[in-house]
Structure formats: structure tokens, C-alpha cells
Image: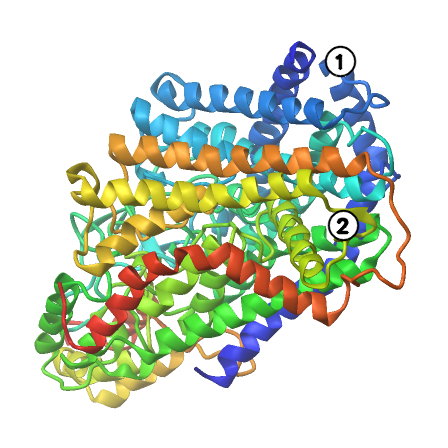
């Protein structure tokens, strides 16, 4: 670890914190229907959309109507994307002449992008036409993120409103999230990316003759436009197989900073939006500090583990002073690889700038654990906020049990119904992750995909289902996941991780919005103070993380000790 | 549910048109107008021949050139049409044996890590200055010049962190080898 490394980490996090308030306030204006500086341009577009779609902005939905809207829209997106991928070879803008995708790969990819996961069983530059990248994947990068934002805003309104049934209009929230939040930011970031060196063209691969006289074929395409929304929407699906480790996705230290800042900005700012909308900005900052504390600890843990190096390689003559360098890029170094790895998994992004599967055992444990916590640091755009609020509800319940009072959060009583749905939501992750992993490790069709045997093999499978269920999308890439078993079950894991979580959350919203909002009294447990911050961190680790400890002990922790003992597989 | 079908279909189509066609095509147009060099892949030409991209590493194996990091792309190293890391875990025998063989090939006892480990992309255009320093003697001998000539070219190409903080010390191998062909042409 070095001082300059930590200064870079601090620099990136400070830039994000500076963006939180202006962006958070802007989004609060957007979702309360106030005018913004973009209204003169986007207002007419928006109204045209509603007219064509038959949406009445004055007609709001209860939780069931809102849920149906989310599900109908996601289903429509899934069908369109699946069809486009299957029929890719018949569609235009396919300069490399790529074939249509197999049914299981198309299912997996459609589920992946509709759920904001962006798990990729394929290599982008060897599989996807430019049209599929743009009109297929980029579209879902926008609208799956906008769907997440919409649900988070609906849950926010459940705390703002009192004694009503309406949570808002999903179609309006979806449209506004796309047009007013994601699109303008994506345009700015995409152009900055091009200036930094990311390609943006519709050409086929070009062929160079290297200095030593060999033909080098170089893949290119509309990279910058996809990279921008991939980060802003916390999607993470790369244009290229190796994601943001590829020099065309991430050519310099500064493009790397912008990648990390772009992926954190909206998720972090949405927490502030929540505070602003419920009329308690301190609540927003309290939640943000939970995520910052845990992210810094996670980053430090990866940075430390990776700087320590791999003793197996030191033993054969590698200078350990640079740390574990397999799977990393020189231009990022250990600090910016560690920060990227922690943020992308704390955040439900899933893009990578270093290969997670080649991290040291403890360095790889951290990203896996951050995902298992439920993607709340600060999580995917929208999905992170609503998952964080589920944990906040659990935290006030735990606090209420300790002192024997009816728990309440922001003036809303938390009762049996909310607790049942909250537990339903948080149990889906261990069920899906541990269930599918258990089947895969005892069956040939599961273990035959492992690249590195021994305890790392378990880690490869555990990481895959963790990533899918948590809607992250990063991978221990050694696992050959493009098989019917993994494509199908990982697709199911992604769908459950998204929708079996989202529906209970909206049910909680429907229940809370109908309750009166009580004023705080002397007996109210303050949820915007350091005590609550500490309690919430404890609840996230214990309720979110502890059930995975036995699996982690058999995977990365065993591997760590085996590595120290000098054994390889 | 029925009342949701029309907005679901219509908004899917409208938002697809805006975010999937208008947005990327507008960015492409603006990028091609404002930053044509970057937008087309930062291509490098020498004597009218396209020799690669400034951002993408390429393979070198002749002793007269600096060598890049090992690459895990298939079937050949530095295949920029199919990027890939090795993805081998830290306790993989395949990793340990490959690295051990690479260390033996250098003939040194404590080798800079980047010289014997595969990058994440398989296309890393850079090596560390420490790695480059271990190659100076070989390149000087192969080009039949004083090491100081090579060291001067290396110093020119080496990039340091801005303000000592932002970025990592690094050497772009393609740029360095192009500079070498200028400073100490082969065949002298």
C-alpha cells in the first residue's frame, strides 16, 4: 500500500461526495414533478410520450398497480431483447457477421440486462453485433436502471405520504428517470470518454500490421456511449469481454476515475434524494455514511490483501513488492484496482478493471462478501436505496425489540406485515445463492465448468450465483458459464434476485403509505445519529452476511491457508 | 393488468428509439466530428502503414525490442479481437507453473511482477519502469549501441503520475519501440 494509492482513493470518494447534494436535489425536483433547467427541452418530449402511450399523469397507482407496471414493462423489454439476440444475424449493423445467440445464452443475456445484472456468459467483441450492443443492451442499461430508480422513489413516497394508497405513476417515474436523469448524464460522460480515448464508431474490426510484421485485428465500435450508461446505470456489462480492463473501455488513470465516479454518483445521490423528499437530509447523510464506512473498509481489505502478493509466485522468483499482479493492468496499479473491485461489488455494478478470479483468496473474498450483503453500498441505482431501506426497517425493528417499544422509521410504525415482507426479501438471496451452489458442486454439469480446482473451484461457483442473485454481474471468470445449466440457472437466479425482492419491497411501500406519519416524540429512536449508523452496519453484516460464512470458510478462507502452506491445485 | 399493456409496449418502443438509436448515433456523430482520432481507435501509422493502436498492446519477441507483459488471449497473444485474462485462481497449478517458466526464461532471480504475469485484458499496452529497466541490456546488445542510448529513449517515453499522485509509473511498449527504431535503427 502507498500514500499515493490512498490519496487516489480519497480523491475519487471526495468527488463523489461533492456530487451527492446537487445531484440529489436535482433528482428530488425531477420526481416531485417540479420544473428543472431541462424542462423546456424535455417537457414536450415527455408529454408526447404520455400521449402516445395513453398515460395520464394525474392518475397515480397503488402498490399493486405500480408492481404490475414494473412487471409488464420488464416483460416487454425481455421479449424484445431475447428476440433481437436470437435474430441478430438477420438484423443490420452486424459488420462482423455474428450469428444469432443460442436459446439458453439469449435467455441468460436477456434476463441479465433486464434485471440490471449484466452478467455476461459471452465475450462482447466476439458475439454481439453493433445493433445488439446499442438497440438491445444499451437500451436495457437505461431502462432497467430507470425501473430501479422508479421503485426506490415509490418506496420513498411511502414515507413522505400519510394515509393514502397511491405511490405514484410508474410510467411517469420511468420516463422521467430516463429522460431527465440518465440521458443527460450519459451524453456528458460519453463525450468525456471519447475525449479520453474510448472509440465511438460503427466500423468493423480493423487490421494493423505490427512492427514485427504480424497482422493484429482490433475490435472497435460504439464503445463510449455504452460505457457511459453502463456506469451511470450501475449495469456493468462491458462492450468487450474483459470489461473495463480493456484499454478501449478504460485507457487511462483518469478514465478510470471517471468510471468509478460515474458508477457511484447516482446511487449515492439517490440516498440524498430520499432524505430531501422525506424532509430529513440528516437521514440521507446517515445512510450515506453507512455505505462510505463499509466501502472504505472493503477497499482497504482488498488493497492490503493484493499488495501482500501471492506467496506461491514469490517462491518461484517473482519480486513481491508490486503485489499480486496476475489479471491486473499496469496503468491502474493496486490501489485503483482495489477501489474499482470494492465499488463495483458494493454497488451492484459488476464491471471490472481487474480479473476478480485472479485476486488473492482474501482479496477475492471481499467482493463476494460485499455482494452477499445485498448490494447496499450504496447498491444499484434505485435497487440499492430500496435494499438499504429494507435493512433500515430491520434495524429499527431490532432496536425496538431491545427496548420493548413499537419500532418506527421516520414516523411510520413498523409492524408485523412490513417485517414479514422485509424478511421475505432478504431471505431470497441466501436461498438462491446457496441452493444453486449446493446443486452445482455435487453434479458433473456443475463441476465440469471449473477452471481452477480445489477450494477456488467452490469460490468460482459461489461467486457466480452470488453475482447473479445480487444482480451484480461480475465473475470469477475461470468458470465456463456458457453452458445450458449455468445459463439457465443463473438466469433464474437473476430474475428471482430482482423481482422476488422488488415485489415485497413494493408491498412494504403499499403498507407504509397507508399509515399515518406520527411526529417524533422523546421515545422515538433517532435514526439520523451515529448510534443508528453503527446499528445499521451491524444489522447489514449479521442479517445480510453471516449466513454465507460457512460457504466462505470452505472457499476463499481455506484457499488462503492452503496458499500460505505452499499448495497449488 | 390490461391497462398496463399499452404503456408497456409503447414506452418500450419510444425509449428504445431514444436510448438505443438517437443517443448512440448522436454521440457517434459528435465524436467523429470533435475527436476523430480517439473515436476511431487511436490508430498509429508509420510510413503510411497502419501499425496498431496507441492504446492496445502488441506482441514483441525479437531481442531488439522491449517485450510487453505475457498475454492470455487466444489463440495468439495480444489478439485484440478477443480480449481475455487468464482467470486462473491464485492457487492454480497452471498459474504457478506458467509464471515459474517465465521467471526461468528471464535468467534473473527476483523478477518484477508485471513481467511474468498476464494482464487482465491480455492487451495491456504498458510495462512498469522496473520491468523496462531489466530489458535495457538485452536491447542495447541486440541493437549494437551503448545502453545509454536505450536508457535515453526509455526515459523519454516513461510516464510518471501527475503531481506524483494521479496515475501509475508506466511505459507504453509500442511507443518505446517506435522511438527506438528512430533513435537506434536496426541494421546499423
Residue linked to disc 1? A54
Q: Residues within 10 Å of mark 1 (few under 14, many from 20)?
A: some
First of labels 1, 2 by sequence position? 1
Report how far apart the C-alphas of labels 1 and 2 lie in the structure: 29 Å
Image coordinates of residue B171 in percent, x first then y, are 35, 73
Task: Give the colour scheme of this rendering.
Answer: rainbow
Image coordinates of residue A121 in percent, x first then y, are 33, 39
The local secondary structure at tag 1 comes to loop
Q: Is residue A328 visible?
A: yes
- Image-based side of A26 in relation to A149, left or right: right
Q: Residue at x 65, y 23 (%)?
A: A69
Using the image as rendered, state which of residue A71 and residue A432 is in the foreground. Answer: A432
- Image-based side of A364 in relation to A27, left or right: left
Q: Residue at x 81, y 34 (%)?
A: A514
| Chain containing the residue with disc 2 | A
Using the image as rendered, state which of residue B144 and residue B124 is in the foreground. Answer: B124
Image coordinates of residue A240 in percent, x first then y, are 38, 45
- Image-based side of A26 in relation to A81, left or right: right
Q: Is residue A376 above or below residue B31?
A: below
Same chain under badges 1 and 2? The reply is yes
Q: Residue at x 38, y 45 (%)?
A: A433
Residue linked to disc 2? A274
The local secondary structure at tag 2 comes to helix
Instruction: Identify the image quadrant of residue A259.
Output: bottom right
How many numbered tags mark residues here?
2
Q: Is residue B88 visible?
A: no
Amino acid at each position: 500500500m502507498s500514500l499515493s494509492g490512498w490519496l487516489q482513493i480519497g480523491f475519487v470518494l471526495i468527488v463523489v461526495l461533492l456530487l451527492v447534494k446537487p445531484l440529489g436535489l436535482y433528482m428530488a425536483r425531477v420526481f416531485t414533478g417540479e420544473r428543472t433547467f431541462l424542462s423546456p427541452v424535455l417537457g414536450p418530449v415527455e408529454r408526447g410520450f404520455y400521449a402516445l402511450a395513453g398515460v395520464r399523469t394525474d392518475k397515480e397507482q397503488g402498490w399493486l398497480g405500480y408492481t404490475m407496471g414494473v412487471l409488464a414493462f420488464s416483460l416487454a423489454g425481455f421479449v424484445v431483447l431475447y428476440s433481437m439476440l436470437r435474430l441478430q444475424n438477420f438484423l443490420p449493423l452486424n459488420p462482423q457477421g455474428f450469428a444469432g445467440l443460442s436459446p439458453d445464452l439469449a435467455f441468460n443475456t436477456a434476463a441479465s440486462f433486464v434485471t440490471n445484472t449484466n452478467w455476461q456468459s459471452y465475450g462482447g467483441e466476439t458475439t454481439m453485433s453493433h445493433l445488439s450492443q446499442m438497440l438491445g443492451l444499451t437500451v436495457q442499461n437505461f431502462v432497467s436502471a430507470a425501473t430501479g430508480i422508479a421503485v426506490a422513489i415509490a418506496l420513498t413516497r411511502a414515507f413522505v405520504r400519510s394515509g393514502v394508497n397511491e405511490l405514484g405513476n410508474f410510467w411517469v417515474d420511468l420516463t422521467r428517470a430516463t429522460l431527465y436523469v440518465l440521458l443527460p448524464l450519459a451524453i456528458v460522460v460519453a463525450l468525456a470518454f471519447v475525449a479520453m480515448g474510448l472509440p465511438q464508431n460503427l466500423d468493423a474490426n480493423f487490421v494493423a500490421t505490427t512492427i514485427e510484421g504480424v497482422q493484429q485485428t482490433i475490435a472497435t465500435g460504439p464503445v463510449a456511449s455504452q460505457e457511459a450508461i453502463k456506469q451511470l446505470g450501475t449495469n456493468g456489462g462491458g462492450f468487450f469481454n474483459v470489461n473495463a480492463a480493456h484499454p478501449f473501455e478504460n485507457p487511462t488513470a483518469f478514465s478510470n476515475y471517471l468510471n468509478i465516479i460515474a458508477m457511484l454518483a447516482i446511487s449515492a445521490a439517490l440516498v440524498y434524494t430520499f432524505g430531501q423528499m422525506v424532509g430529513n437530509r440528516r437521514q440521507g447523510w446517515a445512510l450515506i455514511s453507512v455505505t462510505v464506512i463499509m466501502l472504505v473498509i472493503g477497499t482497504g481489505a482488498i488493497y492490503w490483501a493484493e499488495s501482500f502478493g501471492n506467496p506461491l509466485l514469490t517462491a518461484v522468483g517473482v519480486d513481491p513488492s508490486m503485489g499480486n499482479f496476475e489479471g491486473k493492468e499496469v496503468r491502474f496499479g493496486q490501489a485503483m484496482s482495489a477501489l474499482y473491485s470494492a465499488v463495483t461489488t458494493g454497488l451492484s455494478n459488476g464491471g471490472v478493471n481487474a480479473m476478480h478470479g485472479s485476486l488473492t483468496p482474501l482479496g477475492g473474498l471481499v467482493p463476494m462478501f460485499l455482494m452477499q450483503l445485498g448490494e447496499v453500498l450504496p447498491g444499484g441505482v434505485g435497487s440499492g436505496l430500496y435494499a438499504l431501506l429494507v435493512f433500515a426497517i430491520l434495524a429499527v425493528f431490532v432496536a425496538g425489540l431491545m427496548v420493548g417499544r413499537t419500532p418506527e422509521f421516520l414516523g411510520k410504525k413498523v409492524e408485523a406485515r412490513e417485517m414479514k415482507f422485509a424478511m421475505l426479501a432478504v431471505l431470497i438471496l441466501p436461498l438462491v445463492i446457496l441452493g444453486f451452489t449446493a446443486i452445482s458442486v455435487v453434479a458433473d454439469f456443475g463441476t465440469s465448468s471449473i477452471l481452477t480446482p480445489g477450494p477456488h473451484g467452490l469460490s468460482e461457483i459461489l461467486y457466480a450465483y452470488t453475482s447473479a442473485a445480487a444482480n451484480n454481474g461480475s465473475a470469477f471468470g475461470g468458470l465456463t458459464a456458457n453452458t445450458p445449466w449455468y445459463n439457465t440457472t443463473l438466469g433464474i437466479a437473476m430474475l428471482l434476485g430482482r423481482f422476488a425482492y422488488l415485489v415485497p419491497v413494493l408491498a412494504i411501500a403499499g403498507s407504509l403509505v397507508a399509515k399515518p406519519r406520527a411526529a417524533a416524540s422523546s421515545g422515538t429512536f433517532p435514526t439520523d445519529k451515529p448510534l443508528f449508523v453503527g446499528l445499521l452496519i451491524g444489522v447489514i453484516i449479521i442479517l445480510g452476511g453471516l449466513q454465507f460464512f460457512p460457504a466462505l470458510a470452505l472457499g476463499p478462507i481455506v484457499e488462503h491457508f492452503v496458499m500460505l502452506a505452499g499448495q497449488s491445485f | 393488468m390490461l391497462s398496463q399493456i399499452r404503456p408497456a409496449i409503447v414506452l418500450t418502443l419510444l425509449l428504445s428509439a431514444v436510448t438505443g438509436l438517437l443517443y448512440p448515433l448522436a454521440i457517434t456523430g459528435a465524436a467523429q466530428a470533435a475527436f476523430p482520432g480517439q473515436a476511431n481507435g487511436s490508430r498509429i501509422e508509420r510510413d503510411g502503414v497502419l501499425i496498431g493502436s496507441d492504446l492496445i498492446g502488441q506482441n514483441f519477441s525479437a531481442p531488439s525490442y522491449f517485450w510487453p507483459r505475457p498475454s492470455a488471449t487466444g489463440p495468439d497473444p495480444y489478439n485484440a479481437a478477443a480480449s481475455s485474462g487468464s482467470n486462473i485462481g491464485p492457487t492454480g497449478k497452471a498459474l504457478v507453473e506458467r509464471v515459474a517458466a517465465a521467471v526461468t526464461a528471464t535468467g534473473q532471480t527476483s523478477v518484477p511482477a508485471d513481467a511474468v504475469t498476464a494482464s487482465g485484458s491480455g492487451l495491456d499496452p504498458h510495462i512498469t519502469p522496473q520491468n523496462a529497466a531489466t530489458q535495457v541490456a538485452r536491447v542495447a546488445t541486440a541493437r549494437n549501441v551503448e545502453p545509454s542510448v536505450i536508457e535515453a529513449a526509455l526515459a523519454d517515453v516513461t510516464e510518471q503520475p501527475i503531481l506524483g499522485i494521479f496515475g501509475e509509473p508506466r511505459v507504453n511498449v509500442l511507443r518505446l519501440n517506435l522511438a527506438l527504431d528512430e533513435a537506434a535503427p536496426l541494421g546499423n
